[in-house]
Amino acid sequence: MKKIIMIMAIAIAASSVAFGQMKSKDNSVEARLIALEKQSWEEWKNKNGGFFQTLLTDEAVNVGVGGLSNKSQIVKSTSSDCEVKSFSVDNFKVVMLDKNVALLTYAAIQDGVCGGRTIPAKVFASSVYVKRGGKWLNAFYQETPPAQ
């Protein structure tokens, strides 16, 4: 009986260590995705369409106040369409939908003009990232201004 209790205690301790390691791995994935999302805002401000050429999947979709955009439209508009004075992003939440798909949600404050129109000062945003070939890529982005 003591042997069985000892085996169970070891198994429980080992599983606790394993779960702790999985959580830290998830934290590193979350940190990487949040860093990518923050970088995408900085690259948008700097009009670096080339960054989005490598960040986005070929079938990427962006949903914003101007409607739907595909990858080529996103890259083109990022390079020329917007003048961004400032932005801040916070309150990130990451949900792993599976080991290769993650949903990020967060809030953003922005000051700028795109296509001649002032962009909403505050938005709630979401991005879906997929892992392909060992690299996290953005497949979907949307932003919604809060209700007035």
Image: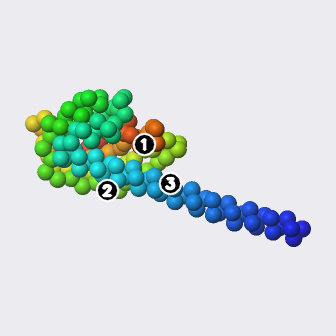
For residue 86, above or below residue 98: below
For residue 12, above or below residue 135: below
Q: How many labels does the image show?
A: 3
Q: Earlier in the sequence, mark 1 or mark 3?
A: 3
Q: Mark 2 points at which residue?
A: 90
- At x 37% / y 52%, what residue is drawn? 34
Residue type, numbered disc 1: Lys
Q: Mark 1 points at which residue?
A: 135
For residue 144, above or below residue 88: above
Residue type, numbered disc 2: Asp
Which tag is nearer the camera, tag 1 or tag 2?
1
Quadrant including the N terminus:
bottom right
Q: Farthest residue in the bottom direction?
A: 2
Q: Earlier in the sequence, mark 2 or mark 3?
A: 3
Separation of marks 1 and 2 at Cα, in angstroms: 24 Å
| Residue 141 visible in the shown view | no
Separation of marks 1 and 3 at Cα, in angstroms: 15 Å
Separation of marks 2 and 3 at Cα, in angstroms: 19 Å
Dot 1 crowding, Cα within 10 Å, few <14, some 14–19, many 20+: few
Q: Is mark 2 on a helix, strand or loop?
A: strand
Front-most of residues 134 and 145: 134
Question: Would you say 25 lies left or right of 119 here?
Answer: right
Residue type, numbered disc 3: Asp
Q: Position of residue 38 (x, y in %)?
A: 30, 51
- At x 46% / y 38%, what residue is drawn? 133
Q: Name the residue under label 3.
A: 26
Dot 2 crowding, Cα within 10 Å, few <14, some 14–19, many 20+: few
Q: Name the image quarter holding residue 132.
A: top left
